Image: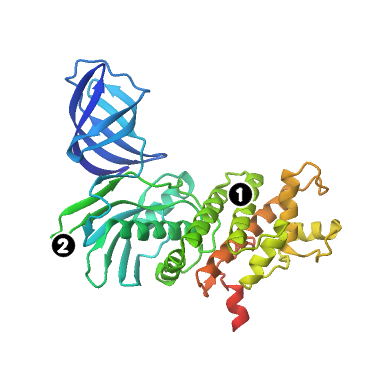
Amino acid sequence: MNHIPLGTTSVEFEHNGRRLTADAAVKLELSLSLKLLIECDFSNANHAIWPGKYTSIRLVNYGKKIPVFISRCSPEGVEFVGLEAPFRVLGNEEQLLSYIEFELLNFSNLRTKHEIQFENWSIEITSVPQLYDIAEKFQNSGGFAKTHSGSLCRSDGVPFSVSEAENILDSLRLQCCFAHGIYCSPILPTGYDESGKEVWKEWGSSSVDIWRWAPSWADIVPPLALSETFPNFYKTLCSSNETKSAVHVALSWYLRSNRNNGDISGGLILTHTALERLAHHFEFRERGAARNIRSLLKKFGIPTELPRCLASLMELSRKYTNSRNLSLTDGPYVFSEVRNNLVHPDHTWNDLEPIAEYEAWSLGQWYIEMVILAMTGFNGQYGNRLIAGRAKYDLETVPWAKQKS
């Protein structure tokens, strides 16, 4: 099925000064684009309705008015595309819930079940039976697919508010994105009260990237267990509003950079910005980005020496004189200098080979991964994106945990 049916509702639509009412079917379309479709039967309206216009409709059953785009008109009816996503169609912030059910799109983690227990909360995520077939189908063609179903409740059975649930689901979204290396998201949450009645619901979807492979620290075999990472990830985000904001912003730039679509130069600038944001959060705010990034890495026990596997950057470090009396194999220095070469026209590192920009970009993305893993208390094994042609089962322990052992 290339869509997820969401239900039916009556729809009101203002057209040429008249109010039209019709029955509508609502669905989330999954194809090469992800969109909320409202298909209405206006066949008896006797009015010409033209596609290509922006307007609004009212979902009568839910008392919700939403902006839409008229995408298709035919004698059988009219198709609207929802422009606000996600949006609440039932309930409010103070509504008390007993449990929530949701779906996950394009989360290619092949573990069949994740059971996450933390702070009196319980999350269960189960893959769809045909997950391996979906992964094989979309690996080259791209697209969107429901990969997992999930539920959220309190393990002590105490009712909880919508705002509490939204905070946890947003944290889960960030964790899944960070692990996958692209945007993926819990979608279509539906909340139930103690009697099992629907009392809260959202339609639409947050940002989700088309199915594709992306480099990531969690691209490993066996697949990452979210139970090993999410509790501390969530705890870190909840430690302060400032920390949550810094991680949100840094991951936004990290994910957009990882998406790059062949634009390594643009990705490198975004990566550099993310590291500066994280350094600023930890009050490393001296003049010179490389100095602040270096201090950030040292804080968490992340090596600052330029990795020897980055041959092109090693060659650059030998070619150009370092006027700041730093080691010529200082990773933050070389990384920042390659970035400066892109944005400052008077920079002296001229005519860099594309491979040098690629290695600098990879190094910066690795720095972000290591900093956020260290911030969130991860001490396990990961996949090192800096190793070209790394097999998924080729793992190593994060550097700060190596130092402790």
Find numbered disc 1 in the image and state the secondary structure of the residue it sits on: helix
To which quarter of the image does residue 342 belong?
top right
Q: Amino acid at mark 2?
A: Glu
Q: Image quadrant for the N terminus?
A: top left
User: Colour scheme of this structure image?
Assistant: rainbow
Image position of 85 with respect to 53: above or below: below
At a point 58% along the width and 49% down the height, the residue shown is: 257
Where's residue 161, x and y in %? 27, 59
Where's residue 311, x and y in %? 75, 60
Q: Amino acid at mark 1?
A: Leu
Question: Along the horizontal axis of the image, is 357 left or right of 220?
Answer: right
Task: Find out whether the residues at labels 1 and 2 contact each other: C-beta distance under 8 Å.
Answer: no
Question: Along the horizontal axis of the image, is 172 left or right of 329?
Answer: left
Find numbered disc 2 in the image and state the secondary structure of the residue it sits on: loop
Where's residue 78, x and y in %? 26, 26
- Looking at the image, which is closer to me, 314 or 395? 314
Q: CA–CA distance between discs 1 and 2?
A: 46 Å
At a point 15% along the width and 55% down the height, the residue shown is: 197
- Looking at the image, which is closer to me, 127 or 15? 15
Can residue 185 be seen by looking at this rendering? yes
Q: Residues within 10 Å of mark 1 (few under 14, many from 20)?
A: many
At a point 58% along the width and 46% down the height, the residue shown is: 260
Q: Which residue is mark 1?
A: 270
Question: Along the horizontal axis of the image, is 391 left or right of 349?
Answer: left
At a point 41% along the width and 60% down the height, the residue shown is: 171
Disc number placed over residue 362 in the picture, else none: none
Image position of 102 with respect to 22: above or below: below
Question: Along the horizontal axis of the image, is 197 left or right of 326?
Answer: left
Q: Image quadrant for the C terminus?
A: bottom right
Q: Which residue is mark 2?
A: 194
Name the outermost residue toward the bottom.
405
